[in-house]
Amino acid sequence: MWWTYSVLFLGWLFSGLESQMILTQPSSMSASPGVTFNIPCRMNTGYSINSERARWYQQKPGGVPRFLYHYYTSTDQGRGTGVPERFSVSPDASQNLWNLVISGVQMEDDAVYYCASWDYKLTGHTVIDFNEELR
């Protein structure tokens, strides 16, 4: 009889657990200078980009992460201090993702890019690898 109560308790305990938000992005992408470049950040099923805020960070070799951009709605978005206007974020609700858009990507954009939502942990990163022949 005690095991019946244990099973019922465990069932009640686990029924209260919610799924965790997971953001995924490619681990590496290649770019050529001058192109418009999109880095996707996809949110897992059960969450919607329409109700969450995206934050993007850039980390150059040997440096610390720098806040680039936040996006919540078309009227609630913005760049960090000193971030060039060629950086923006474009949501794609049909795929439940945000794209960090770099218009006219430059060699100085060679960095690691992180996306996050609100105060959730950074869950991945994307490294832009410029084509070797262009270096």
Image (spheres, rainbow, N blue to C red):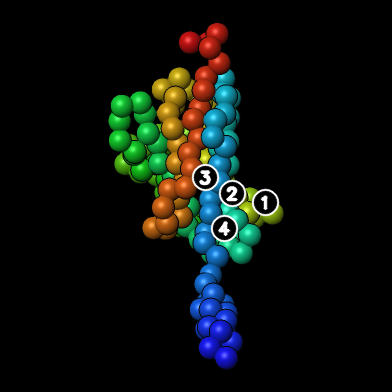
Residue 42 marker: 2
Given residues 13 and 110, the one toward you in this image is 13
Kind of residue sitting beneath label 4: Ile
Q: Is residue 73 visible?
A: no
Residue bearing the label numbered 3:
89
Compared to residue 127, the image places residue 81 above or below, namely: below
Given residues 24 and 5, the one toward you in this image is 5
Residue bearing the label numbered 1:
95
How far is disc 3 from disc 2 in space, using C-alphas? 13 Å
How far is disc 4 from disc 2 in space, using C-alphas? 9 Å
Given residues 82 and 50, the one toward you in this image is 50
Q: In the figure, residue 61 lies in which quadrant?
A: top left
Residue bearing the label numbered 4:
49
Q: In the figure, residue 107 lies in which quadrant?
A: top left
How far is disc 4 from disc 3 in space, using C-alphas? 12 Å
How far is disc 2 from disc 1 in space, using C-alphas? 8 Å
Q: Residue at x 59, y 61 (%)?
A: 48
